[in-house]
Amino acid sequence: MSLAVLALAVAGCGTQNADHSSGPEVVTDNTRADNPVARIPLGDLPTTPTNGLAKGLTLPLDAYTYSAKDRYVWQVAVQEQWRSCMQRYGFSAFAPPAPAADSVSVQTELGMGRRYGISDLATVQKYGYHIPDEVPESPRWEPAAGAEEAVFTGAGSEIEQGKYKGEAVPEGGCRGEASRMYPLPQTTEAEEAAARSFKESQSDPRVVEATAAWSTCMKGKGYTVEEPFKAADLIGSSLSAAEPSDEEIRIATADVTCKKETNLIQTWHQAEQEKQDAEIAKHQNTLSTVKKEKDAAVAKSIAAYDKGAE
């Protein structure tokens, strides 16, 4: 039986299902594939962009959804439980690639850092609209075929009447055991509220005015474009190229420069904050439940993460 590739989704772009029977996706660092995950102090993992015009920005509904940091800590907890479980059945060398801590900062910058379009001048002067090549790629990983895979998944000819060599195997194998120990409840309602607030913010009079000012600024630099998310269209096929063209970098530089000159990102962020506050007030009961479940899941993962650091 072949298992799916493990790769973590970009924070903010979706949720993990409560049912992880087919396995969560995990961004990993192959350099630590044969060792327990080194514990980076939680305070060293960013929760907001650290550079550019979006530096330090947060939104009210962030508290109701999983950050890249939350997901990384959860990954570490899940993998530690995988190893602990597999060791009970004699698989002491079981070693999936460890989650990559670097993915936290990368995903954070790609999330809020690009929520209103590109925002970091230093980055775009090197990459244009391209995604920085520091983004870690997800390595392929599967447990070894045979007994290891059977105990990990709970299915295979090596499992007889729910047992492996006479020892009962958890439902869904060690993967299933870890998923039950560290569930990741969906935050769909909060994500939908965030999507609504973003869409509404685009038509806020302040954002419309700031966007028009940005467009005028761009025109003064030789580029005719109505709004930031259409700016990349000006570069044509360059975006699919391996490296950004000089023209792409010039356009991206103008884009960020005009955002700074017109205060577009701060204006847009303020408008969206207000829209999200309204969403929270309107759906308080539902979102409070979402937050309670999310916070409990995060707290459990943090406890396991901290225990592993002892």
Image (cartoon, rainbow, N blue to C red):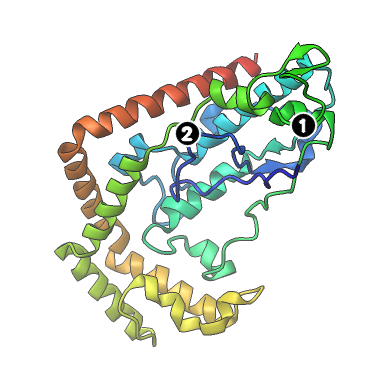
Tell me the residue at 21%/58% (across/down).
200
> Which numbered disc, 2 or 1, marks the residue that appears first in the sequence?
2
Residue 156: numbered disc: 1
Local secondary structure at mark 2: loop
The residue that label 2 is drawn on is: 18
Which residue occupies the foreground of this view, 232 or 174? 174
How many marks on residues? 2
Q: Residue at x 54, y 23 (%)?
A: 180
Residue displayed at 64% across by 44% down? 27
Q: Amino acid at mark 2?
A: Ala
Quadrant of the image containing the N terminus: top right
Q: Position of residue 10 (x, y in %)?
A: 51, 49
Q: Is residue 66 left or right of residue 89?
A: left
Task: In this rendered view, identify the residue nearer to me: 261 or 178.
Answer: 178
Q: In front here: 251 or 287? A: 287
Quadrant in which the C terminus appears: top right
From the viewer's perspective, is residue 212 above or below residue 299? below
Residue 92 percent coordinates (x, y): 83, 21
Q: Residue furthest front?
A: 161
Instruction: Locate residue 100, reporting x and y percent.
Output: 66, 40
Q: Quadrant of residue 40?
A: top right
Q: Position of residue 253 (x, y in %)?
A: 47, 72
| Above or below: residue 47 compared with residue 91 | below
Mark 1: amino acid: Gly
